[in-house]
Amino acid sequence: ALQISDFINLAQQRLTRELRTRPMLKVATTTANSADGTVELPSDFLEMRELHFQGNPEIVLTYQTPDLFFRNLLTNTGATPVYYTLLSSELQFAPVPSSNLTLQMLYYAQPTFISPTTSSNLYLANYPDALLYATLAEAEPYLMNDARIQTWATMYERAVANIMKNDDGSKYPNVSINVVPR
């Protein structure tokens, strides 16, 4: 019984690495203060989708790799931030905000994993086939059933491809936009 929960956990880890879908998106709002120009990432953070400071107008931030970020010579000045980078579990802004600003981030969040105390999650509710196939693919080497590994891997890959295709389709309308001349 212990191995079954291990296989399910490994399957969930695999889905977490390979899927980025609309149901995984979350919005978080926090304050970036002028003290140090950093904000802690949410504990369930996987990947950033969009980041801006609220205001009129909104301040859209541009990502820079850490090496470029520290070479831009703006990390110690106080002004309106235009750049951000990810350092371990926090965001850092440049220039450092000269006043407190409200930060809004749209990010992909790691779903809560199924466990003895959690009977369902985003994967089971939305992608039960992918979760099943990934779990079976993780179990077969342990069961020494090498002949079935490729079967479950193929079914998993097909399920994930369909999930991603359907998710892409849900982000954009499937209608043509007609421009009516005036």
Image (spheres, helix red, strand yellow):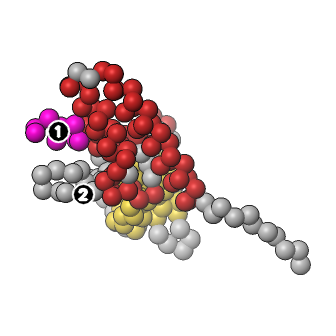
The magenta-colored residue range is 1-9
Kind of residue at disc 1: Ile
Asked if the magenta segment contains residue 164, the reply would be no
Mark sitting earlier along the chain (1/2) = 1
Residue 57 pos. (x, y %): 56, 71
Residue 99 falls in image quadrant: bottom left
Q: Nearer the viewer, residue 109 or 28?
A: 109
The residue drawn where x is 41% and y is 59% is 23
Residue 119 pos. (x, y %): 19, 57
- State yes or no: discs 1 and 2 in contact (Cβ < 8 Å): no
Task: Tell me the residue that label 1 is attached to.
Answer: 4
Residue 163 pos. (x, y %): 47, 49
The residue drawn where x is 45% and y is 57% is 22
Task: For marks 1 and 2, give the CA distance.
Answer: 16 Å
Q: Nearer the viewer, residue 100 or 150?
A: 150
Instruction: Specify the quadrant that holds the N terminus.
Output: top left
Q: Element under label 2? A: loop
Q: Nearer the viewer, residue 175 or 56?
A: 175
Asked if the magenta segment contains residue 5, the reply would be yes
Task: Tell me the residue that label 2 is attached to.
Answer: 120
The residue drawn where x is 55% and y is 59% is 170
Q: Element under label 1? A: helix
Instruction: Note whether residue 20 is visible.
Output: yes
Magenta-drawn stretch, dominant element (helix, strand or loop): helix
The outermost residue toward the bottom is 182
